[in-house]
Image (cartoon, rainbow, N blue to C red):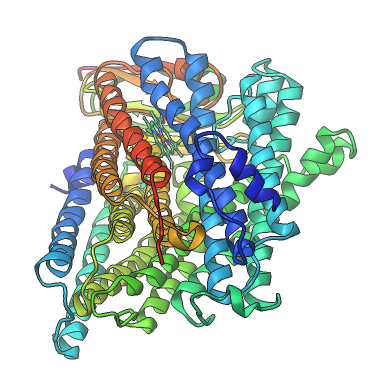
Amino acid sequence: MSVANTLIQKAPFFGRMFQMEESDLNPINSWPALMAMTSFVWLTIAAVLGLSMPAIQLFDLGSHWYYQNITLHGAAMAFPFAFQLMVAMSLHRAGACLGKRADGILVALTYILMNVGALLLTVAVLMGFHVTYTVMFPLPVVGVMTGQWSMSALVIGFTGIAFVLLSMILTYPIKILRMSFFEKKHDELQLAERSLKDPGMIGMIMGVLVLLITGLPLLATASPILLHLYGIIPAEWIAWAVKPVVFEFIFYIFAHNLMEAMAIMIVGAVYATLPLCTADGSRRLYSDKIANLALWILLVTSITSFFHHFFTMYPALPSTFAYHGNIMSFATAIGGALTIFTILATIWKHGLVATPAVFLILGGFVMYILDGVTAIVISNVAWNFKLHGTVWAGGHAMSVLIAISMIWMGMLYYHYPLMTNRTINDSTARKCIKYFFLSFIGLFYTFLVAGAAGMPRRNAAWEGDWLIYGAMLGVFGTILIYSFFLYFSSLRNSKALDF
Amino acid sequence: MTDFIYSSWGALVITLLMQIPFLIIFFSVVNKKAFVDNVAADTPAEKYTSTRYLWIAVVLISFFVINFASVKYMPTFVEANAELSNVKDVDISATSWKFDMSERSFKVGDTVRFLAKSEDTMHSFALYHPDGGLLFTMMLMPGLETASALVHTFDKPGVYMVRCLEYCGVNHHGMRSVITVAEK
Ligand code: HEM
Ligand SMILES: [Cu+2]
């Protein structure tokens, strides 16, 4: 039995979601299933941490716990949950659509680097390395100098982050590129043939290229810093890399485009799956051309819109870059507008078969668009000075990840019979979707209203009205956790397909 | 009017104005095509094309208007239009976890240029109105020659909170200060 299958067999609670027989399809199923399962383990831990944050504030349990848990929550949700789930589903799609094996050394490395890296970072955070998932460079180093955490916490934390980055920037993108362009095709694995011209495939390739290209400068900057921390290279060699302005810009060029890559990838996945759920069985989008145009607009405009992270540095960020970032951010929304049109025109033209998979995907798409509006609004220079640093921004980061993950969870419903030979529990799935959407709306608008009221993000001392917003996050967060539980149940209580 | 729109609550209103029509249209289309009559529509091709042009035109025009009207509130514009001879420069130095300010007491009507730098890690200088709302935040990146700078005219007396809004370590929430503004 393959390693991946054995690990799934042995996993308590979560394993039952992905139980599968040995079959000829293992090369496209096993690793994606293991990755999806592992991402749900991280989701469970991170969700409890999410709920702990309002609790810590309301019961005054101490700022130490707040900063520890926000770092763990943000990092776990963004990387080993949301990103890993995306890796799982996109490997499965690439495998089944192109007839390529989704296993091998690069896949195993991606899995190990992501999860061991996230574990190392967790250890560092528990040792006091409270830097949030955006690192806030040069805080990791300043924190050691001011005695906030130890040098060993810094070294372990940076090692963990380096592992995670290697999987996101190198092993995963290279694997998808290899599957798309090079590896040997196996006809028996090709379950749903697609060409690389398909919008669904183009979105995937664009996404991994963005990760690879915008990530390489970050690897080039972070690696010497790490080598210095290990005592391998002298301090003079890294003086250029540790300049805050150098590191921060390179970091955000990647971090911003990481989110955009995940978004482009998800739009591609929606384009690929929606036509399969149309009522007239035509299996077509309203227009492939417009779908592709939207992807290209998203790709081109998103790259330089990262300047919106730095508007409030004025005038150290020259205004010309600020205006450029402002305009490019709104231009991404033109790609969004074309996507909305394509989705609605497809549904209108071909009708819709209302399965839980479709509703989860469309529900996630709605969230993605709602969140996108808040993203462009805060990307206007004038509004940015009033919202940057409030929970409006934090809520946007969280909401886009929830939206993207919800779409992948819908994709998993769609792929599930293929992966496991079982069908999900339909009624539990429908119930899950209702609670999922409801709690999302609650969390999302609470963050927005609190942000408009000036509530600071990442602040361990909520006061006055902020406590009320915090309590609401607790209530809606509890419902969201319940919907995750229902989601897991809908997979755990799946039924064998009969032929 | 535009003063309200380009406030943080105005941002929320504009956000809702974009989201609510989207929600209504999206859910009615999905509801119709998934439950009411989930069959292929025989809408003529030109109808799709004209709807598409209309939709993109609406989006482009509203984006243009929103951004064009906001220029007045951008820092370059505010600075260029302040009577520079009357502007008081206030130097701020931020370190974990305090603000050193060259001056902390002002009068209503004073136009102040806040020039702020960080000495150690990322911080921000964020000014809160006595009514609790955020007036602006300035990100302070350490190691830069140029100070972050913003011009502000005080319109109400009272105690203005200053907070750091860029996470800066274990006592980030304690990084606060006050500015007092007296009647004219
Ligand atoms: C399960 C219920 C959840 C609750 C109660 C919750 C609560 C919170 C809270 C209170 C914050 C901190 C706000 C601040 O102080 O700035 C936060 C931040 C965040 N959340 Fe969640 N959350 C939940 C689920 C999720 C999910 C499902 C995701 C992603 C898929 C997610 C991703 C994030 C991210 C990325 C941040 C930003 C962290 C940072 O600013 O450093 N959360 N969440
Ligand atoms: Cu600070």
Q: Tag count in the figure?
A: 0
| A131 to the left or right of B8 | right
Residue A271 vertical placement versus A244 (above, below): below
Residue A76 vertical placement versus B74 (above, below): above
Q: Quadrant of residue B59?
A: bottom left
Q: Quadrant of the C terminus of chain A?
A: bottom left
Residue A141 seen in the figure:
yes
Residue B131, how many percent across, how many down?
Answer: 21, 23
Q: Quadrant of residue A107?
A: bottom right
Residue A305, how many percent across, how many down?
Answer: 47, 58
Q: Quadrant of residue A126?
A: top right
| A14 to the left or right of B154 | right
| Residue drawn at 68 percent across, 15 percent down | A147
- The residue nearer to you, when weighing A374 against B184, is A374
Residue A261 vertical placement versus A247 (above, below): below
- The residue nearer to you, when weighing A139 against A367, is A367
| A444 to the left or right of A210 | left
Residue A436, how many percent across, how many down?
Answer: 29, 43
- The residue nearer to you, when weighing A227 against A178, is A178
| Residue drawn at 38 percent across, 84 percent down | A289
- The residue nearer to you, when weighing B138 against A48, is A48
Can you name the residue that lies furthest to the front here? Answer: A499
Residue A317 seen in the figure:
no
| Residue drawn at 44 percent across, 60 percent down | A417
